[in-house]
Image: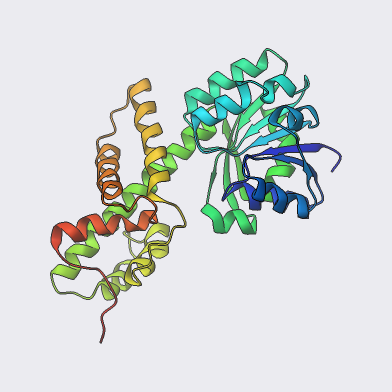
Amino acid sequence: MGKKIGFIGLGIMGKPMAKNLLKAGYSLVVFDINADAVNEVVAAGAEKGDSIKDVAQKSEIIITMLPNSPHVKQVVLGENGVLEGANPGAILVDMSSIAPLVSKEVSDAVKKKDIVMIDAPVSGGEPKAIDGTLSIMVGGPADAFEQVKDILEVMGGSVVRVGEIGSGNTTKLANQIIVALNIAAMSEAMVLATKAGVDPESVYQAIRGGLAGSTVLDAKVPLVLDRNFKPGFRIELHIKDLMNAIDTGHEVGVPLPLTTQIMEIMQALKVDGKAKDDHGGVVQFYEKLAQIEVKRSSK
């Protein structure tokens, strides 16, 4: 428990993750531009950092949990950032979901000061952040991973090193493609069943045990039937991940025809004012086209 941890980024995900580290007995120094979030985590036992640089100076392990690639570059490489404050030998654990090539770029920059970076994006959304059961996909040197594995296991139910720097984020992008396309397939099928006059709940029960069954189906169909699009994971965040997936695909030479399709469906929903809906709300795109709603029958 000896290592002092810096935690930068106390948003929907970062705040509960930081609290879980405090509960496990780790000493934390924290920073976020949102003062309320900082005060809440300080009340739970953390020390308040004066700046990003200050947090980095006081920490042996620095965790960042930020919205996207530009934020990570700014926080780590910008003025009064992590790189200015961090001591040689520190380990930077970026848990944001960003473009894999940016992970590599930031890693190369911090290496010059003898700081090791690993990318460790997460899957599971706010509920799993709160109960400490996130899936954490890690890229980076094996020895650095071993040094932070116990810390990651406090926040995650599954912690897997998949390869070198950037590979954690590549794994996350693969995850996000599969989730998005599962939701699209489910939506297309359920709208078809409903408009053809078959009760969607019965269709779900009939197919969930077969080859079409999936974690996505079990997580999202009941919410759709209840018309509950309150976010676990917002459409606008899934758009960000798919944008990174498409950019990465183009960089490495992989066409992503289906990813591009679901991205455009999500863009249409965003224009329709649904960017903050849960990604299960993709069904609304199909419903609008077919002029039908997938919901529990009133029988």
Residue, far top: 112
Residue, far front: 35
Residue 59 location in percent, x, y?
Answer: 78, 32
Residue 254 location in percent, x, y?
Answer: 32, 26
Q: Is residue 186 left or right of residue 3?
A: left
- What's the residue at 54%, 19% (across, down)? 105
- What's the residue at 76%, 49% (across, down)? 42
The type of colouring in the image is: rainbow
Measured along the vertical axis of the image, is residue 99 above or below residue 26?
above
For residue 63, which quarter of the picture?
top right
The residue nearer to you, when weighing 39 against 102, is 39
Residue 283 in view here: yes
- What's the residue at 37%, 46% (across, down)? 178
Q: Is residue 213 left or right of residue 75?
A: left
Q: Is residue 246 left or right of residue 149?
A: left
Measured along the vertical axis of the image, is residue 74 above or below residue 47?
above
Residue 22 location in percent, x, y?
Answer: 77, 51
Residue, far bottom: 299
Residue 86 location in percent, x, y?
Answer: 74, 23
For residue 278, which quarter of the picture?
bottom left
- What's the residue at 55%, 25% (across, down)? 73
Measured along the vertical axis of the image, is residue 126 above or below residue 104?
below
Residue 164 in view here: no
